[in-house]
Amino acid sequence: MRCPYCGSQDSQVKDSRPAEDGGTIRRRRVCPDCNGRFTTFERIQLRELQVLKKSGRKVPFDRDKLARSVEVALRKRSVDPDRVERLISGIVRRLEQSGEQEVRSEALGEMVMEALKGLDDVAYVRFASVYRDFREARDFQSLIGELGRGDGLAAIDEEETTPDETSS
């Protein structure tokens, strides 16, 4: 593995251990030339996935690009990095287990939105606003309305009105 500090091609593994419930191997490495220490991760890749864009173009699936877009949505949010890694790994696992060689970009975006909805409401709204290309404030209002109905707030509103009706 190439050293990220000096570019030497000869790094040594000092420690290996499983990470992410055994789906990844975490390796601590040291460069014998500059003594730089760094960590690498080894993951299972079942197949080469392709993302089918709206334009019809196909591009290789990039886990790092997925992670970057999730991180942008979560910027300045206090979410445990392990939960974020599990979210990303879960999406990748679903894609690989589907058995399909291609995934539509729309389906991938919906997977990310659904995962973020369960993780952080603000990140969900941020991601959705870019993914769905919001143009007006009413787009945000509509999405937030959907979010409110989905997390039980509508049921709470109904419970608050029911006792008033029965007490009259």
Image (spheres, helix red, strand yellow):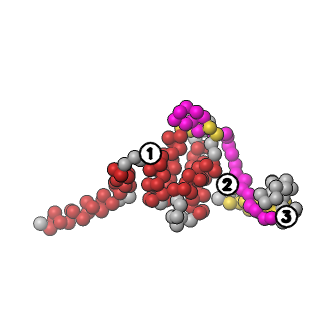
Query: Quick one: label 3, few (<14), some, or many (20+) residues within 10 Å?
Result: few
Query: Residue at label 1?
Result: 133
Residue 44: % across, % down = 70, 49
Residue 38 as seen in the image, left or right of residue 117: right
Highlighted magenta segment, given as a residue range = 36-58
> Which residue is more in the foreground, 162 or 65?
65
Element type at mark 3: loop
Residue that lies at the very extreme toward the front in this rendered image: 135
Query: Quick one: label 1, few (<14), some, or many (20+) residues within 10 Å?
Result: few
Query: Residue at label 2?
Result: 23
Q: Residue at x 33, y 60 (%)?
A: 153
Sequence-earlier tag: 1 or 3: 3
Sequence-earlier tag: 2 or 1: 2
Q: Quadrant of the C terminus?
A: bottom left
Residue 30: % across, % down = 82, 63
Query: Residue at label 3?
Result: 34
- Depicted 15 relative to depicted 131: above or below: below
Marks 2,1: beta carbons within 8 A: no
Element type at mark 1: loop
Q: Amino acid at mark 3?
A: Cys
Q: Amino acid at mark 2?
A: Gly
Residue 143: % across, % down = 38, 51
2 vs 1, front mark:
1
Marks 1,3: beta carbons within 8 A: no
> Which residue is more in the foreground, 50 or 69?
69
